[in-house]
Image: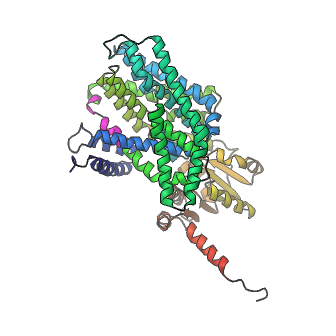
Amino acid sequence: MHDATPLIATVVGGLVLAFFFGALALRLRLPVLAGYLVAGVVAGPFTPGYVADAHIAQELADLGVILLMFGVGLHFSLKDLLAVKAISIPGAAGQMGVATGLGMLLGWALGWPPAQGFVFGLALSVASTVVLLRAMEERRLLDSDRGRIAVGWLIVEDLAMVLALVLLPAIGGFLGAGHDGPAPSVGALIETVAWTIGKVVVFVALMLIVGKRAIPWVLQTVSASGSRELFRLAVLAIALGVAFGAAHLFDVSFELGAFFAGMMMGESKLSQRAAEETLPLRDAFAVLFFVSIGMLFNPQILLLRPWIVLAACLIIVVGKSLAAFLIVRAFGRPPKTALTIATSLAQIGEFSFILAGLGVSLGLLSTEARDILLAAAIVSILINPLLFVALDRWVARHDADTPDDHPDMAGHTVLVGYGRVGRRVLAELQASGARTLLIESDEDAVRDLREQRETGSVEVVIGNAAAAPVLAEANLSGARALIVAVSDPFEGGQIVRAARALRPDLPIVARAHTPECVGHLGGLGASEVVYGEQELARSMFEAAQPRKPAGH
């Protein structure tokens, strides 16, 4: 059955194993990504039992990366990209240079050829798209200044890797690796560089001139048909079609093509709906991405070369991150921003594996060096969520140590979330004269409240409301009520559960989109759950009732 249907077997096997080990990791209070990676190791060729098709798993993972970058592009405008270019371009270049140099230094110490040390170091220098964006999304940082810098940094790295993947065969030939004939000239190498950069420029220009108008127009036209199924299909067709076309016509990576497709679609008023339609597929394929990484891992390398793996991990987690931290601080950014960027980049992923595979095929990288790279990548991915937990605690403690920003309050209402619903709730609270403390993780979202914060009509706490230190800073013990206005039911559930644990008698109001969410939030401790569609139906019914004449 497995041989007859390798695609189905790979999808089913990967998702089932990921669910089992992910749930086990959560039970053991470990990062859920650890479970996904272990699932990949179990399904890989280096452990006994079931073996999934590695080639199919990698292609499914590529789909996940495409959809993920497309989703990021939807929330990332050209203005945002240009706003961080001054730090992202030199920052990414400097950090990649430091990591590549450290990799070459390690290769020199091990007696590797210079070309192998260069490829190894270059693979250590670029962060994983999936890991970085997952961490940013979990903390709702993508729309913040820190998130924009990280994404801009990531785009610069992707562009650099696109160039590296095209040039590596030419460089390999220039160095004499994998070639019996004469090495290409310097002129030929310069020509290859110019041709590659030219194709990238043409693709970007085409997206900015044609795509910026054509993609939103297609979405508007399809939306007018009234078919949700056709709209969802249009979104996926644009995301995957542009990514595929960018890769095959312009030699641009799938990730970069999908990002620009999403950014152009973000010009449409339907971008939020497009993001919601791609979310389930993105999450499912992102899981398969981590499973595919685990399948590449040969555990024996940890026994054969433990100290070399440790040295590679230190370059990724310490060397590269320290370089990023110092660069961001050199640009005058606050420590919180510098630590966030440094933590985000303290791992490597998909581009590193592609580069390593190409290096092996060209004779520039040994299979042992590739295995060391894979082991270091998996260790860094496992460590990265723990680093973010430490960062969250540092940020919460640092903000709590700033008494002028968040003085103690009593008899106030705590509002979590300053999105479309949260803004309206805050307006109603202020109209009623209620003292309000707002918790929001996105610093940029609350900039318009600066004047109100100065007058004392509203206090703002920046952070993740599910974290106990942040809720403690909101002084729930003296609060009149808690309103959870975030849209994500899982995030809302975490906040409700944490608040209920801190204060059992606190009135908690939460919002829900489905009847199932009502039960979920109520079971976690919400005193009242407002179901949007039900309230809308009640309001429409009441508005349709005949009004009694005055005096009756």
Horizontal arrangement in the rendering, residue 129 relative to residue 541 (left or right): left
Q: Position of residue 89 (x, y in %)?
A: 58, 27
Q: Position of residue 286 (x, y in %)?
A: 41, 45
Horizontal arrangement in the rendering, residue 427 relative to residue 243 (left or right): right
Horizontal arrangement in the rendering, residue 359 relative to residue 459 (left or right): left
Examine the image and state in which quarter residue 316 appears.
Answer: top left
User: In percent of the image, x 36 and y 49: which residue is there?
Assistant: 22
Q: How many marks?
A: 0
Q: Looking at the picture, does residue 318 appear above or below residue 255?
A: above
| Nearer-the-camera pick, 44 or 335 | 44
User: In percent of the image, x 47 and y 64: which residue is there?
Assistant: 520
Examine the image and state in which quarter residue 300 appears.
Answer: top left
The residue most toward the bottom is 552
Magenta span contains residue 294: yes
User: In percent of the image, x 53 and y 25: which residue is there?
Assistant: 197
Q: Looking at the picture, does residue 450 appear above or below residue 128?
A: below
Do we see residue 37 in this rendering? no
Magenta extent: 289-301
SS assignment for the magenta stretch, majority: helix
Quadrant of the drawing holding the C terminus: bottom right
Q: Position of residue 320 (x, y in %)?
A: 48, 26
Magenta span contains residue 474: no
User: In percent of the image, x 59 and y 71: which residue is there?
Assistant: 535
Q: How is the image coloured?
A: rainbow
Q: Looking at the picture, does residue 416 appear above or below residue 352?
A: below
Q: Position of residue 163 (x, y in %)?
A: 48, 25
| Nearer-the-camera pick, 79 or 478 | 79
